[in-house]
Amino acid sequence: MCIGATLVDELYFCEQNCISNTSNPAVKTTSIGGVISNIAQHLGLLDIHPSLITALGSDADADYIIKSLNQKGITLHQSVITDDASGKYVSILNPDGNLIVAVCQDISSNYLTPEFLESKGDFIKGFELIIIDANISTASIQWLICFAKTHQQKLIIEPVSVAKATKLSSLNLEGVFMITPNEQELMAITNLNTNSESTLVQSLLHRGVQQVWIRKGNQGSVICKNNDCITLGVPQITIIDSTGAGDAALAGWLFGYLNNENEHTCLQLAHTLALEVLQIKGAVVQTINSDNLYRIKNTYYNEHQ
């Protein structure tokens, strides 16, 4: 079960370096974005077939989202459809992909309320695993934490950004299965005046989180639980676009976890999908499937690593 924001991403790549205060010729690309939807799309391509609860408008963007996600095996029939406009992210970029400016309208926090989620409680409690992003409101995140704990479900929280991660700083995290911050988001969640990674991780474990997965960019990542940490590095690559790499990592890990792989293999699959996303424009590797994910993993990590 995936719960969070879904957006239409419109990226405008200027043909020449952008000149302010005037019109610039550009090439447009359109895709479906939002952290939870990036995760759900990769899971669908990997034959996991997740359910997605999100907020959509009554517009052409919603039609595009529903049709595209259904084609990837993602069900949205429990989502809320509003009279509002569907969420949208619009960015202006130079030809080299560097961002000039972007704007984002996200309706998920307005409509994925605790009251709405409660109305879907019978459906949500049927899932073993719930993944949420921090685009939804603080109250809704807390409701889902308590709901998952009550029904013995595993809940994973993707913090999204430093600003969104601060929502978690004041919450009761007792029973959360995993949180997946980068190093800056980890500091925002803990709100402690220290740079000690072990201190920050221990504070989350003391608050009831079962494991903390810290993403460290080109230094790889580490998953910590109690006194046990698993670390994995990454090979050096040429990065084309960093959008969605963390989302892909979580999808790769979930694929391994749901296929009963060991912890080390799960992390290798996570890094593999993230590495592939970093080498394309966009947040989703549209050609990925379960067979070639394993094959590509073996080019980055052999079985003895």
Image (cartoon, rainbow, N blue to C red):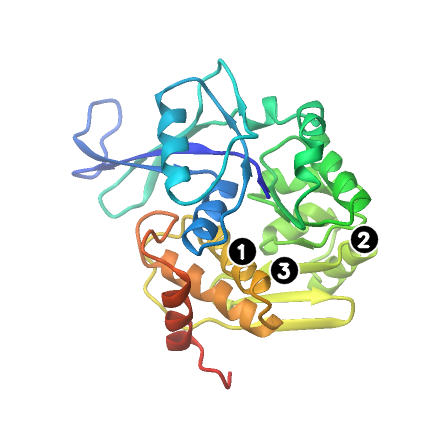
Q: Element at badge 2?
A: loop
Q: Within 10 angstroms of label 3, few (less than 14), some, or many (20 or more) residues?
A: many
Q: Nearer the viewer, residue 215 or 304?
A: 304
Total marks placed: 3
Above-or-below relation of 21 to 242:
above
In the picture as drawn, the residue positioned furthest to the bottom comes out as 304
Determine the image quadrant of residue 60.
Answer: top left
Please name the amino acid that badge 3 sits on: Trp
Query: Tag 3, which secondary structure?
Result: strand
Nearer to me, 87 or 76: 76
Q: Quadrant of the N terminus?
A: top right
Labelled disc at residue 26: none
* Above or below 2: residue 290: below
Label 1's element?
A: helix
Q: Amino acid type of disc 2? A: Gly
Which disc, if any, is residue 250? 1
Label located before the other in sequence (1 or 3)? 3
Residue occupied by mark 3: 213
Q: Residue at x 56, y 36 (%)?
A: 4
Residue 151 lies, in percent from the top left, at: 78, 44
Amino acid at pointer 1: Leu
Task: Mark 2: give few (<14), some (14-19) or many (20+) Cα within 10 Å.
Answer: some
